[in-house]
């Protein structure tokens, strides 16, 4: 094929992170974290954020690693935000004051948080933890922060401008303070949605409960599939979603020691992301392998197939453009 498929491989150890990706970057509990842009720029406020694969896919994929008791403060998105936990234990909490509810997620767990709600997350394990995030649309919009976080960030010397640029006032003087984004007022906060823990649990699928979600495809005793979000179709078989969110992308899991999918083509964007095992990908006769934490963007319209080649049960996420 004419495309060098190695350019579409994002190996985690080769990704370049931002250490201060957001306005909260100097605050205690938020300063010891890293942000990675794997596919698309995501919502990073760091103008120097490195993007591994810049080609528009109809969605963005990023990653977050954090030291114990570090993470992200309360914020809201205008497009979908779906979390894929790779390691550690992550506490998600929500509401404008962070007290409306919480959930703890671990390796292999999936959570799709609704738009127009404030949410934050924190690594509550004893070691550095990692998760990946899928955001909706080519342009996932900008983050809206809670008033308290913006006020605390400004006291730390970090401000966000109305063009979404991040300024460290210890290094750069602001000539026009009217261009600084101001905290939301009380009446503006009333437009955001509220959820209980029971509400959010409907949008969470835990990996240790995977057996109740698995569906066999036509390769019985070989492939098991969980379809999390949007419709997933493969070889004339459809899998209904378990989470009722319209995100602009589908998210599914292929599981098994001998798991594989025979040759097929897609006109829209498709990405393979490895949770465990080792997977061989064939694109128009060219082969490449991915391991845990690696991501591969399949060239559109290529004839592709995948198979698990390690001696263990493998788990591979498949993300497809649906918008």
Image (cartoon, rainbow, N blue to C red):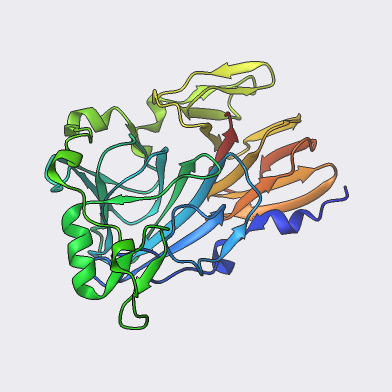
Name the spot of residue 7 as percent of width and height, x first.
73, 58
View extreme (bottom): residue: 171
Q: Residue at x 46, y 31 (%)?
A: 247
Q: Is residue 67 visible?
A: no
Nearest the eye: 198 or 282: 198
Nearest the eye: 109 or 230: 230
Name the spot of residue 154 as percent of width and height, x first.
23, 69
Above or below, comparing residue 297 to residue 244 in the picture: below
Q: Is residue 237 visible?
A: yes
Question: In the visual, does 217 lie left or right of 141?
Answer: right
Question: In the visual, does 101 lie left or right of 104?
Answer: left
Nearest the eye: 45 or 110: 45
Q: Residue at x 18, y 34 (%)?
A: 197
Count of marks, rendered view? 0
Q: Where is the C terminus found, in terms of image quarters?
A: top right
Above or below, comparing residue 221 to residue 11 in the picture: above
Q: Residue at x 48, y 29 (%)?
A: 226
Name the spot of residue 9 as percent of width and height, x first.
67, 56
Question: In the visual, does 153 lie left or right of 311?
Answer: left
Quadrant of the image occupied by residue 117:
top left
Q: Residue at x 29, y 27 (%)?
A: 202
Name the spot of residue 291 as percent of width and height, x first.
59, 55
Question: In the visual, does 144 lie left or right of 15?
Answer: left
């Amino acid at each position: 094929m004419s495309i060098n498929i190695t350019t579409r491989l994002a190996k985690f150890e080769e990704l370049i992170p931002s250490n201060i990706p957001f306005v909260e970057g100097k605050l205690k509990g938020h300063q010891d974290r890293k942000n990675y842009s794997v596919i698309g720029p995501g919502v990073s406020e760091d103008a120097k954020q490195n993007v591994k694969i810049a080609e528009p896919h109809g969605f963005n994929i990023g990653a977050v690693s954090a030291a114990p008791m570090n993470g992200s403060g309360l914020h809201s998105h205008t497009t979908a935000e779906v979390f894929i936990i790779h390691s550690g234990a992550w506490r998600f909490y929500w509401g404008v004051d962070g007290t409306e509810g919480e959930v703890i997620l671990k390796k292999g767990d999936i959570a799709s948080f609704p738009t127009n709600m404030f949410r934050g997350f924190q690594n509550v394990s004893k070691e550095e933890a990692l998760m990946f995030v899928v955001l909706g649309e080519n342009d996932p919009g900008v983050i809206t922060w809670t008033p308290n976080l913006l006020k605390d960030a400004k006291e730390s010397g970090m401000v966000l401008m109305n063009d979404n640029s991040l300024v460290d006032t210890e290094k750069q003087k602001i000539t026009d303070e009217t261009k600084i984004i101001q905290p939301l007022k009380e009446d503006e906060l009333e437009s955001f949605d509220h959820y209980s823990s029971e509400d959010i649990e409907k949008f969470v699928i835990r990996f240790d409960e995977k057996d109740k979600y698995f569906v066999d495809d036509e390769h019985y005793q070989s492939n098991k599939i969980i379809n999390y979000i949007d419709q997933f179709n493969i070889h004339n078989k459809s899998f209904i979603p378990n989470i009722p969110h319209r995100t602009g992308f589908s998210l599914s899991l292929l599981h098994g020691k001998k798991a594989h999918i025979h040759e097929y083509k897609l006109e829209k964007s498709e990405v393979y992301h490895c949770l465990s095992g080792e997977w061989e990908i064939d694109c128009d006769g060219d082969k490449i392998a991915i391991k845990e934490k690696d991501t591969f963007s399949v060239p559109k319209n290529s004839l592709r197939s995948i198979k698990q080649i390690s001696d263990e049960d493998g788990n591979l996420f498949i993300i497809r453009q649906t918008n």
